[in-house]
Image (cartoon, rainbow, N blue to C red):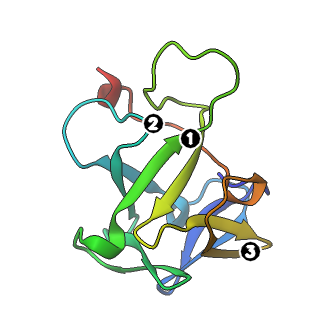
Amino acid sequence: KSHTGARLDVDDYTIRARWTADRSLQEFVLEGDHSGTIRSGDTVYLKNFFGNYIDVNGTRVEAQWNNRGKWQRLQIERAVFGPVSNDAVSNGDVVYFRSHTGMYIDVVGHEVLARWPDQGEWQAFWIHDLDEEQNN
């Protein structure tokens, strides 16, 4: 979920943030580059309802292909507020997704792009419904 309260969704191949209600088009699976717990700094991939992965091409954020390559590779970075006992990503965490370009995915209005190397409000996402088995 983005800072606007809207969840990411797919419009053709383009990623948008338009609705706050749960819909199947807003289902994304967070996949790690390895098995086990996803931690801050890990490489991750976001797979949409149709089986395609979010990719970054320049500043555009889309979901065009069902393979995991350089354009689909994201680094997840967990926001830290106060003391932290571990760096595992959990339900309710605020995270940032840094693309292969070095820019973070951001949301302005309904538009989802990767334009700046900042971790600000526009780049913040909340983790929801993370599969509990992933953390075991």
CB atoms of marks 3 and 1 within 8 Å: no
Give the answer, above or below, for where 52 lies relative to 42.
below
Is residue 81 or residue 113 the one in the foreground?
81
Q: Residue at x 61, y 32 (%)?
A: 92
Separation of marks 3 and 1 at Cα, in angstroms: 19 Å
Q: Residue at x 34, y 75 (%)?
A: 71
Amino acid at the residue labelled 3: His
First-in-chain label (2 vs 3) = 3
Q: 92 left or right of 39?
A: right
Separation of marks 2 and 3 at Cα, in angstroms: 24 Å
List the residue tagged with mark 1.
127
User: For residue 42, what is the image quadrant?
Assistant: top left
List the residue tagged with mark 2.
130
Give the answer, above or below, for where 124 lies relative to 35.
below
Is residue 128 or residue 125 the one in the foreground?
125
First-in-chain label (3 vs 1) = 3
Query: Dot 2, crowdedness within 10 Å: few (<14), some or many (≥20)?
Result: some
Q: Residue at x 47, y 80 (%)?
A: 62
Give the answer, above or below, for where 88 lies relative to 113.
above
List the residue tagged with mark 3.
110
Query: Dot 3, crowdedness within 10 Å: few (<14), some or many (≥20)?
Result: some
Amino acid at the residue labelled 1: Ile
Q: 26 left or right of 16?
A: left
Separation of marks 1 and 2 at Cα, in angstroms: 7 Å
